[in-house]
């Protein structure tokens, strides 16, 4: 089945040690998003790629970066994780075009623990 | 700015009871989409429904039903004859276009309602 896959499901990193989360999709969607969901909170958009164009939300910390080497893959890099970055990170995709509004597909998420 | 309010933080009901989860939204857009997602303990977001702002018909899917009322900016979700497997956090969300292209959008989520079904 076509889907959005996030690896790993669980990631543990040390305070200050860079970490990368990955997302891949077989849907051939041109838009990919990263959401952060802290415990008992709503998911919050960090940034998204529209094709190759990177779009950062105004309140996303500089500590968070993203790479999209091709249509299928997108990475979330946390340069120096702090304890406050422990969260579930959700990747989502969508395809633009008329009639496509509201068609986000989410992956299963990566739960990041910072020790 | 868009806003979604889910006033019910936690709800517990006994199995087989009906339960309604409330969602109230604010937007200046004339065209928008509303969503409900289920998040079980495993963490993934499971899509339940998407509703276009022009379509106010109520929808029923098995034990699930949704009541969209534009006049009160509400999009409530009812589970009939609840089951233990319905236990999860439920999020209501509102889409906001990120550009002129359909499909490039941002979801604003409510804070979620944790539903516990007691056997």
Image: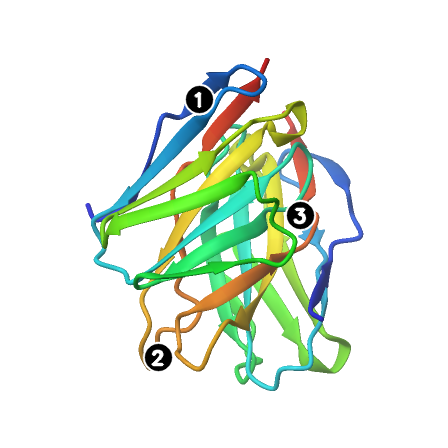
**Tag 2 or tag 1, which sits nearer the N-term?**
1
Pointer 1 residue? A10
**A13 horizontally vs B2: left or right:** left
Give the quarter of the image for residue A40: top right
**B28 horizontally vs A102: left or right:** right
User: SS of the residue at dot 1?
Assistant: strand
User: SS of the residue at dot 2?
Assistant: loop
Q: Which of B15 and A41 lies nearest the eye of the viewer?
A: A41
- Residue A102 rendering spot, x and y as whole percentages: 44, 68
What is the chain letter for disc 1? A
**Which mark is on residue B18?**
3
Regarding residue B61, the answer to whether it shows in the image is no
- How packed mark 3 is, by other alpha carbons closer than 10 Å (few <14, some 14-19, many 20 or more), is some
Closer to the observer: label 2 or label 3? 2
**Which mark is on residue A88?**
none
Residue at image position (19%, 45%) is A1
Vertical side of B112 occupied by A58: above or below: below
The alpha-carbon separation of the residues under discs 1 and 3 comes to 35 Å
Q: Which of A108 and A90 lies nearest the eye of the viewer?
A: A90
The alpha-carbon separation of the residues under discs 1 and 2 comes to 35 Å
Q: Which of A87 and A65 lies nearest the eye of the viewer?
A: A65
- Residue B73 rendering spot, x and y as whole percentages: 72, 74
């Amino acid at each position: 089945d076509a889907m959005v896959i996030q690896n790993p499901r669980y990631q543990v990193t040390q305070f200050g040690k860079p970490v990368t989360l990955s997302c891949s999709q077989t849907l051939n969607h041109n838009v990919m998003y990263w959401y952060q969901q802290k415990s008992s909170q709503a998911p919050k958009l960090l940034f998204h790629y529209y094709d190759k164009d990177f779009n950062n939300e105004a309140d996303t910390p500089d500590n968070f970066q993203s790479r999209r080497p091709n249509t299928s893959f997108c990475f979330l890099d946390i340069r120096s994780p702090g304890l406050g970055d422990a969260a579930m990170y959700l990747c989502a995709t969508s395809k633009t075009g008329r009639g496509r509004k509201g068609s986000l597909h989410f992956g299963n998420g990566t739960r990041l623990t910072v020790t | 700015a868009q806003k979604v309010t889910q006033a019910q933080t936690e709800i517990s009901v006994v199995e087989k009871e009906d339960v309604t989860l409330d969602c109230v939204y604010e937007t200046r857009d004339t065209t928008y989409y509303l969503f409900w997602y289920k998040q079980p303990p495993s963490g993934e977001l499971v899509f339940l429904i998407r509703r276009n702002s022009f379509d106010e018909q109520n929808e029923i899917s098995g034990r699930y039903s949704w009541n969209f009322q534009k006049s009160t900016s509400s999009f409530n979700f009812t589970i009939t004859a609840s089951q233990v497997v319905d236990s999860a956090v439920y999020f209501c969300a509102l889409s906001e276009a990120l550009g002129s292209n359909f499909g490039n959008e941002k979801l604003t989520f409510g804070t979620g309602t944790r539903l516990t079904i007691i056997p």
